[in-house]
Each structure stands twice: as C-alpha cells, then as structure tokens.
Image: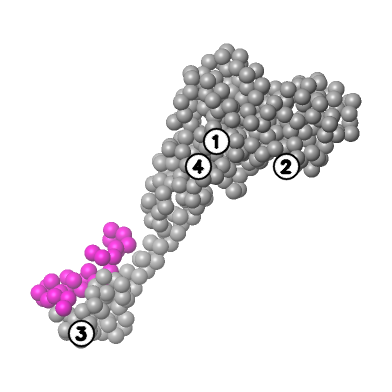
Amino acid sequence: MAVRATDDLFPPGEFIRDELKARNWTQRDLAKILGRPAKSVNHIMSGKTSITTKTAQELAAAFETSAELWLNLESAYRLGLERRDQVDVARRARLYQKAPISEMMKRQWIRECDEVEGIERQVLDFLRIESLDEVPSLNVAARKSASYEDTTPDEFAWCFRALRIARTIETQPFESGRFLAGLERLRRLTAAREDIREVPRLLAELGVRFLIVERLPRMRLDGVTLWIDGASPVVAMSLRYDRLDWFWFTLSHELSHVKHGDGLSIDRDLVGTKRQRSEDKPEFEQRADREACEFLVPQAELRSFITRVRPLYSRKRIIQFANLHQVHPGIVVGQLQFREEMPYSHSRDMLEAVRHIIIDSAVTDGWGYLPAA
C-alpha cells in the first residue's frame, strides 16, 4: 500500500484494487476501460490524485456501484489524513515546548529529522524520560537548588548535554581534603590571563569534571554544579560573558558548591546589570557568592581599598591593588562592579576576553567545537 495514515486508514485505491482482483483485471485494463493514461490510474490507486465527481462516476460505471460510494471513500480518506496531520502538528508543538528542537538539531545534539516519531524518540532518549508527560530529572544528586523547579526547557537541554559530555571526562577520584588543599594552586592562576588555560587540568587533578557548553540563545544560565553518582562533581559553564572577571567569579561560585557538597545547583544571572541580588537568594547561594568573592580578593582588604580610594577608582590604583594581592586587575574591577562601587562601563578594557584561551584546553561544546559524547 503506497499511502496509509493510520493502521485503519486506506486510500480509495485499496478498494479499487479489491474490485480489480474480483474481476481479474489489471491497472492497465482499468486504464483502457476508463480511457485514461495508465499513469493517471496509478496516481488514483496510490492516493496521489483525489477522486473527483467525474472519476467517481466513471468508477461507478466500471464496477457497477454508485458514484457516492467512491466520493464517500475519498472524503473519509482525506479527512483521515487531515486528522493525522493535526495530530502530528500537536505532537510537534509538544516537542517544541519540551525542548529547543531547532537549536538541538543545529548544534547536532540530535540528528536532523522531519518525522515527528523520529524527533520524539530522540528527545525522550536525550532527556532520559519515557513520555512527554514526564518532567526531566537531573537525578544525579539528592539536593536541588531552589531554582530547579523553574528550570526552562532550554536549561534542561543544556544541562543534559553537559551531563552527557561530563561522563566522558577522565579525572582523579574526588577527595574533599585533596580538593580543598588544591584550591590555593587554583587561586594562583588568577594573576595572569593566559594561566586560565591550566584550569581544566588542575581541576581534573582535584577530581572535578570541568567543561564549557555554549549557551542557547534564550538562556541566562551561567553555570551548573552537579554530581555523577553522588561522588564525582561536575562544573559546567556557559561563558555567557566572554570576560575574565565573569569566568573567575562563576567558577569560584560553583566550586563553593562543590566544597560544601551542595548537590545540583543551577545558577543564572550571577553577574551583570540584571544579576540576582545576593540577599534575594537562598542561604547556600548567598554563601557561594560570599566565598567566591573572598576566594578571589580578600574582602577585608577590598573594603579598606574602597574606603581609601572611593570614588576615584583610577586605573593605576586598581592595578596596584591587584598586584598587591596577586590577582588580575579585571577581577578587581569585577568585584567593584559587583559591589556597585562603579558602573559597568568603568574600566572595560581591563575585563579581558578569555574564551579563545579556555576553549583550547577545556572540553568544549559550541563555537564550532563538537566533542565526542
């Protein structure tokens, strides 16, 4: 059968085929009887050509039936096709609500596919769910952040992609004591922009799976911390802002979650003009903000600097303070902006780009990079 909408939906050509079989006629015989080209009859049989009033009358004469029979069969078949198309449209709509299908195909997270069944199978597999009625679950740790319930389909897709890639990254076994002892080595990498390339290697030595996944267009997600099997921490970052200060604050924030075993944490708007204020966050997120700031710049020293210098934050003074504490000046600028001591337009030249450096050493998905996962 050339065309079938569902298991019980047949084109009228199937009934024509029965009539031919009963009379021991071929399609060529019918074409001769109707005075039509064989190709025309073949198209009617396959459903490619609809049965018109004239065709129905001719079939009725050939098979000694009524024209209404063939018109009714044609109408029922076409209505069935339209209902099937409506069902497919509804299924596609649900899929596009469940996940950013176009972006996932564009990024090769799922393969290009036009058939709704093929898309649905891939999405269910990607999100590890049995049906579209299920809510995806990043069930890799007991604790979830307060923002988990508000996770968008784009964020879920991004997190599942990050998790899939993270499982391929090899690291040393995670041990809390060794991790804490190694943080000072990580802190020493903040002084020079080029040293950022050492971050993935060092984190792997400390048992942390680190990766970069380019954000999806509608996302404001900065970073995620999760645990594989409750024992192996993963830190995934989006590089939403290609700035050294953003990189180090986001990484330090996520490593605070690792330090305290906070479980799954989905962090959005950590920096920038639309950032979520710390006092509006749950306590463990406030703690991560505080510890990230302290890790990068001793806060007592920064407060003293602010008292002495405010509001004359000159380039020279910022660089002197940064050199004193062996940290890149852009991180100091970021801290002052975070505290709203200076506008985000101040000292922009110190907020150096780092993406081209970090993606050369980190497992990266995006910007033309496609890791095996």
C-alpha gap between disc 3 and disc 2: 73 Å
Q: Say which amino acid is labelled 2.
A: Lys
- Taking the spot 35% from the left edge, 66% from the top edge, the residue there is 80
Closer mark to the observer between disc 1 and disc 3 = 1
Q: Could you tell me which secondary element the residue under label 2 belongs to? A: loop
Q: Say which amino acid is labelled 4.
A: Tyr
C-alpha gap between disc 2 and disc 1: 30 Å
C-alpha gap between disc 1 and disc 3: 71 Å
**Could you tell whether 324 is left or right of 85 in the image?**
right
Q: Which residue is mark 2?
A: 274
- 107, above or below 168, in the image: below
- Label 1 Cα neighbours within 10 Å, binned few <14 / some 14-19 / many ≥20: few
Looking at the image, tell me whether mark 2 or mark 1 is earlier in sequence order.
2
Q: Could you tell me which secondary element the residue under label 4 belongs to? A: loop
Q: Which residue is mark 3?
A: 34
Looking at the image, tell me whether mark 1 or mark 3 is earlier in sequence order.
3
Looking at the image, tell me whether mark 4 or mark 1 is earlier in sequence order.
1
- 213, above or below 63, in the image: above
Can you give x and y, in whole percent of width and height, for residue 51 in the image?
Answer: 30, 78
Question: Is residue 23 on the magenta stretch?
Answer: yes
C-alpha gap between disc 4 and disc 3: 61 Å
Q: Which residue is mark 4?
A: 369
- Taking the spot 76% from the left edge, 40% from the top edge, the residue there is 348
Q: Say which amino acid is labelled 3.
A: Leu
* Disc marking residue 169: none
Closer mark to the observer between disc 2 and disc 1 = 1
Looking at the image, tell me whether mark 3 or mark 2 is earlier in sequence order.
3
**Could you tell whether 140 is left or right of 195 in the image?**
left
Residue farthest to the left?
Answer: 24
Q: Which residue is mark 1?
A: 360
Q: Could you tell me which secondary element the residue under label 3 belongs to? A: helix
Magenta segment range? Answer: 1-28
